[in-house]
Amino acid sequence: MTYVRQTIQRAGERFRGGEPAAGIVTWHAFSFSGFYDPDNVRFGPLAACNEECLAGGAGFAEHPHRDVEIVTWVVEGELTHEDSAGHREVVRPGDVQRLSAGEGVQHTERNAGATPLRFVQMWLTPSEFGGEPSYEVVRGIADGTPYALARAEAVLHVRRLRSGDRTALPDAPWMYVHVVRGAVRLGGEVLREGDAARVLDAEGVTAEAIGAAELLAWEMHAEPHFG
């Protein structure tokens, strides 16, 4: 097992944002919105990993994006997505949603039901800017099925583990692991729900579940080029 450097961010170290009075609570892993830390802007192409909690009826009004790949993983509840390209979908636990903003798109996200909604949303900066926006939902993605994000030269890996299970994680220049549920042992550290690890030059990394666990791992191969 080889680590050039592994940095752990605990759930409680994330910046709290959102609008609690409007039923929106957000925990940010990176600089975002009104919070800026020059030493915590991105990791490879990953520029945001937000844990979002929306009360019934709460949501984000229509807003624009461009030159960003937005990948969403629903943990609990149902997320209703609508965008200016005509897509309207309900995203449920086990689905992977991708919105490639390209040269520009507007969308809304909301909890149209009464059950609380919790999801993890990750933003990656593409290697090349522009192009037509595109959208996709993969329903019920299976464990071990990689989800490639070609525009950002990145691959998402979903792992659902039983107690004691060990899983190999991808070798990559940048590897980011977010624990969705439960706890895992990674590189001598125990990561619990909401914790994340950033690993540079990952090689031979494994995770071991402590009880049932679910995690998301990004395999990333290029930093974005600006200008």
Image (cartoon, helix red, strand yellow):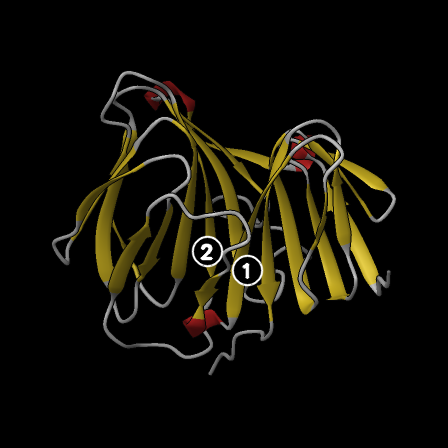
Q: Is residue 227 left or right of residue 136?
A: right
The residue lying toward the viewer, choosing from 2 and 55, is 2
Q: Position of residue 128 (x, y in %)?
A: 41, 79
The residue lying toward the viewer, choosing from 22 and 67, is 67
Q: Position of residue 185 (x, y in %)?
A: 79, 40
In the rendered structure, which amino acid carries the disc numbered 2? Trp
Residue 59 position by quadrant: top left
Q: Is residue 49 left or right of residue 104?
A: right
Q: Is residue 203 left or right of residue 47?
A: right
What residue did someone put label 1 on?
46
Q: Position of residue 100 (x, y in %)?
A: 32, 63
What residue did someone put label 2 on?
123
Q: Residue at x 65, y 49 (%)?
A: 177
Q: Residue at x 51, y 80 (%)?
A: 225
Q: Position of residue 29 (x, y in %)?
A: 59, 44
Q: Is residue 193 left or right of residue 127?
A: right
Question: Which secondary structure lies at badge 2?
Answer: strand
Does residue 182 sit above or below 184 in this rendering?
above
Q: Residue furthest left?
A: 86
In the rendered structure, which amino acid carries the disc numbered 1? Leu
Q: Would residue 62 be seen by someone viewing this image from the given angle?
A: no
Q: Residue at x 63, y 61 (%)?
A: 43
Distance (Cα) linking label 2 and label 1: 6 Å
Which sits earlier in the primary sequence, circle 2 or circle 1?
1
The residue lying toward the viewer, choosing from 131 and 213, is 213
Asked if the residue at tag 1 contacts the one at tag 2, i.e. Cβ–Cβ closer than 8 Å, the answer is: yes
Does residue 217 sit above or below 163 in this rendering?
below
